Amino acid sequence: KRHEPRKAFELSSRPCAVCAESIKQDELRIKQAEESELQDILDKRSHEMASRTISYEALPDDVCLLLLAMDASIGPRLAEGTFRESECDALVPYGFGCFFMRLREEEIILDSPHAARPGTYFLEDGALMVRRNQAEFFLVADDKFGRGGKAIRAIAEREFTNAQALFELWLDYAENDVIRYLLDQCQTYRLMLEPEDLEKIKVAVRQGLHTYSVSQLWFVVWKVIKDAASYATHKFSNRIKASATIPRKIRQQIETAAKENGISRSWNRPDGHPAGSLGKVFSSIFRIDEQTDGRQVSERFALLNSESNMERDDEFESLATSFMQRALQNQNAGSSLARLTEAIQAGCDIKTALEGVMGSNMN
């Protein structure tokens, strides 16, 4: 019967009070040791991150353009404070994470453990882990100007000359601008793209952008999505089958345009589809927007090299003229030319050699 006492001892499923307290103390010591180890790691990491510097002057043009766009997006905190990754979502119309990760991978943007809230960092099997959605980031200091507005102004005042890097950045931006419109249209017509289909579309769009504008490709996307939505209502079709036709149809439309008269129509930027701060930077510095086709973009960037070369040619011409005039005035043209030849044979370029000979007063 249930009320009768048991005739044999049984092991308890719970520890006694003394053992429970001992276990609790052991767990507390382990937790404190882990917290102490984590804090030591974070202190070391914070010091290491904060002490790093880079040369803003040596940064490539495309990275500098990204930093100007980030400054426009998050303001003074880029150069003076910290910010979260999610606060950079206004950088581009879609896919800001890939642009942010590029700056992270090149260690231009670093994380700041001391600025993050508790629980952002933790140890897992001895390795430091971070919850990226909680992490705080900052722009590494310039080795000349440090951190602050002066360093950002130095970037804004630089001369952009790397046409290829800028064009590739524009392709990255423009591709995401088209994909944002594509995804919005798919949502409107309840069509679903598989990840591999989206990648195929990105390849076709990027290729098309070498010739056409973002706004022209928006028209192509609109036409294909409308056709797919109509196909989905057919008796022997459905939205899955219709969605699967989208990558092929977009590629075919772009290929057909290349063989015929191009893409004759274009759309204006839709409401609720902002250009992003990078788009605004392209517009303000290079006068490039969604209506500018890829050939025009390439030509505008190519002009940067031409303008830079023209400036260098003018400077060289002036230097060479001064060299010849001074050599004739001092009646030492022969010796001056000999010293110039020696400097070039020693490995100097012509401009450096001219500056060196003229700097020695050509005596």
Image (cartoon, rainbow, N blue to C red):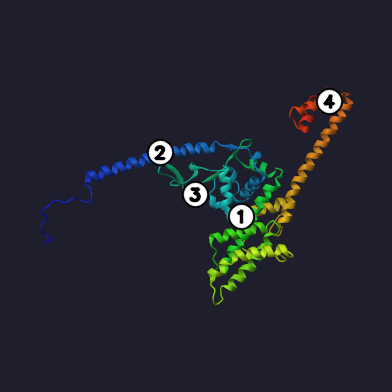
Q: Secondary structure at mark 4?
A: helix
| Residue lying at 63% horizontally and 54% vertically, measured from the top left | 173
Q: Secondary structure at mark 2?
A: helix
Which disc number belongs to residue 336? 4
Image quadrant holding the N terminus, namely bottom left
Nearer to me, 32 or 326: 326
Q: Would residue 81 be visible to someone looking at this image?
A: no
Q: Residues within 10 Å of mark 2 (few under 14, many from 20)?
A: some
Q: Measure how far apart labels 2 and 3 are at the Cα level.
A: 21 Å
Q: Measure how far apart labels 3 and 1 are at the Cα level.
A: 20 Å
| Residue lying at 55% horizontally and 59% vertically, measured from the top left | 196
Query: Do residues under tags 4 and 1 come within 8 Å of each other at their CB atoms?
Result: no
Above or below residue 231? Residue 316 is: above
Q: Quadrant of residue 57?
A: top right
Q: Earlier in the sequence, mark 3 or mark 1?
A: 1
Q: Residue 342: give x, y in percent of width and height.
A: 78, 26
Q: Earlier in the sequence, mark 4 or mark 3?
A: 3
Q: Which residue is mark 2?
A: 37
> In the drawing, does residue 32 fall left or right of residue 70?
left
Q: Which residue is mark 1?
A: 92
Three-letter residue code for mark 2: Glu
Q: Earlier in the sequence, mark 2 or mark 1?
A: 2
